[in-house]
Amino acid sequence: MLTAIFGGTFNPFHIGHYEILRALENDERIGKILLMPDRLPPHKTDEFLIDDATRIEMCRLASEDFSKCELFLFEFEREGKSYTYDTLTLLKEKYPDTDFAFVCGGDMLVYFDKWCHYKELMKMLPFIVFKRTATDEDFFNSCIERFKKEGMEIILKDDLIPTVSSTAVRNNFEASRKLVPKKIYDFLKESGVYSAKN
């Protein structure tokens, strides 16, 4: 059985993330889902990053709805930016008997060759890939074929995940009720984390 690592900034956690969890939960090949918020994402500036405690709590709330899912704060155990290559190297060293797979949205896969040490990373473990609704299908398919030829093991999921702009949710939170799971929307509303943007 695979242990799926679902990492991300989750800034905020929205329905696209939630639907990925649902698809992973229903996949019989997956025995466990590790929901892993980034501590300091290398590709994003922290000026738009809400506080760690809020992002962690959103992930905790989401994980409650799925029996296979658990909150995994591995990236908060170390300093520096959260490069996927470094994280997975440490994970595989710490848990050598675990069969990990890394969850990747199609919007991220098409830029995979921009990731740090991507050639080494693609050969470390299988990648569970989801296509998003706004993904350019021809470009996406060409990237799949290219990375497979370079040695990447790809498990392509049929589930089509809705494309949600985290920036749009942050900038117009009141109008984004349907783009965020209700329990998370209620938590964010009560905390007032986006009140300054409205």
Image: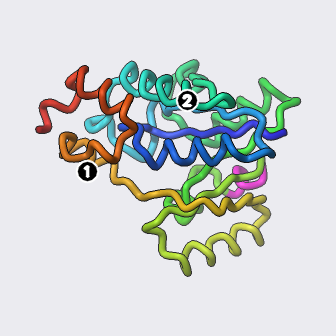
Observer-nearest residue: 144 or 17?
A: 17
Query: Distance from label 2 to label 1 (Cα)?
Result: 25 Å
Observer-nearest residue: 145 or 24?
A: 24
Q: Is residue 2 left or right of residue 11?
A: right
Which SS class for mark 1?
helix
Which SS class for mark 2?
loop
* Dot label at residue 65: 2
The structure's colour scheme is rainbow
Q: Across the whole image, how many numbered discs are drawn on residues?
A: 2
Q: Which residue is mark 1?
A: 168
Which amino acid lies under the numbered mark 2 shown in the image of this protein? Asp
Residue at 80% from the left image edge and 40% from the top image edge: 2
Residue 157 in which image quadrant: bottom right
Q: Characterize the local packing of mark 2: few (<14), some (14-19) or many (20 or more) Cα atoms within 10 angstroms.
A: some
* 2 vs 1, front mark: 2
> Up-down: is 90 above or below 107?
above
Residue at 69% from the left image edge and 73% from the top image edge: 146
Mark 2–mark 1 contact, CB under 8 Å?
no
Q: Position of residue 149 (x, y in %)?
A: 77, 72
Q: Position of residue 176 (x, y in %)?
A: 26, 46
Residue 81 painted magenta = no
Q: Is residue 94 left or right of residue 81?
A: right
Q: Position of residue 155 (x, y in %)?
A: 74, 58
> Up-down: is 77 above or below 58?
above
State the residue lying farthest toward the bottom.
138
Earlier residue among tags 2 and 1: 2
Which amino acid lies under the numbered mark 1 shown in the image of this protein? Ala
Which stretch is magenta?
Answer: 119-124
Q: Position of residue 140 (x, y in %)?
A: 57, 72
State the residue lying farthest toward the right.
97
> Where, quadrant-wise, is the N terminus in this rendering?
top right
Residue at 42% from the left image edge and 58% from the top image edge: 163
